[in-house]
Image (cartoon, rainbow, N blue to C red):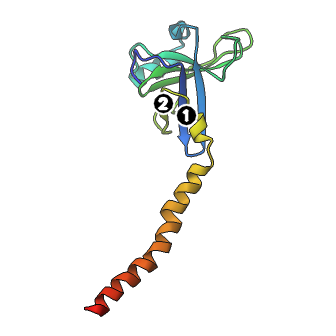
């Protein structure tokens, strides 16, 4: 996801069974980058973030700014921002804990696919059970060819 890319829905995948969905916010993300503390400025500078990106709101709620969780950024530069009931933002944090966590960002709603329980079951059968059923049949077929010759 580039600095100038805007998605209506952003899916952040944390692991095979954990993900979050964010929706494009009507607010400008640059609003949250004003009046930064020294620590926040250092955190943003350390990440390598320059400018650009979009602001996404967790969940789909009509109330913007008050008591919300936001995700702001692009590519590998993502920051989490929380606001209180008055709309004041709390500290800005790196979303991936400065690289200690690995997340995958997709510019679409993947919830229907990630909530599907048959996908792991399908892979269990395909990768674990099916080979064990096929290997005796294949080995007996190769032995019968050896005995015929």
Which residue appears at 29% of the width and 92% of the height?
Answer: 148
How many other residues sit within 10 Å of disc 2, few (<14), some (14-19) or many (≥20)?
A: some
Q: Nearer the viewer, residue 88 or 130?
A: 130
Q: Is residue 67 above or below residue 123?
A: above
**Mark 1 near mark 2, Cβ–Cβ under 8 Å?**
yes
The location of residue 36, given as percent across then percent down, is 53, 11
Mark 2: secondary structure: strand
How many other residues sit within 10 Å of disc 1, few (<14), some (14-19) or many (≥20)?
A: some
Q: Is residue 35 above or below residue 60?
A: above
- The quarter of the rendered structure image containing the C terminus is bottom left
Mark 1: secondary structure: loop
Mark 2, residue position: 106
The answer to which image quadrant residue 52 occupies is top left
The location of residue 51, given as percent across then percent down, is 40, 13
Q: Is residue 33 above or below residue 101?
A: above
Which residue appears at 66% of the width and 20% of the height?
Answer: 60
Mark 1, residue position: 110
Q: Nearer the viewer, mark 1 or mark 2?
A: 1
Relative placement, left or right, of 132 versus 90 is left
Which residue appears at 31% of the width and 86% of the height?
Answer: 145
Q: Is residue 45 above or below residue 99?
A: above
Which residue appears at 52% of the width and 11% of the height?
Answer: 29
Relative placement, left or right, of 61 versus 76 is right
Q: Nearer the viewer, residue 2 or 67?
A: 2
The location of residue 21, given as percent across then percent down, is 60, 28
As measured in the structure, the alpha-carbon distance from the residue carrying label 1 to the one carrying label 2 is 8 Å
Q: Nearer the viewer, residue 95 or 104?
A: 104
């Amino acid at each position: 996801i580039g600095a100038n890319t805007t998605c209506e829905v952003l899916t952040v995948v944390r692991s095979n069974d954990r993900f979050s969905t964010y929706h494009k916010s009507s607010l400008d993300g640059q609003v949250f980058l004003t009046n930064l503390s020294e620590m926040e400025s250092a955190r943003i500078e350390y990440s390598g973030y320059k400018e650009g990106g979009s602001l996404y709101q967790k969940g789909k709620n009509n109330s913007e700014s008050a008591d919300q969780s936001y995700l702001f950024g692009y590519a590998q530069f993502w920051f989490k921002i929380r606001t209180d009931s008055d709309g004041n933002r709390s500290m800005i944090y790196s979303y991936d804990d400065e690289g200690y966590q690995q997340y995958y960002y997709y510019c679409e709603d993947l919830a229907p696919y990630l909530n599907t329980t048959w996908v792991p079951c399908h892979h269990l059968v395909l990768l674990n059970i099916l080979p064990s059923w096929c290997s005796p049949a294949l080995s007996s077929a190769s032995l019968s060819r050896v005995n015929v010759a």
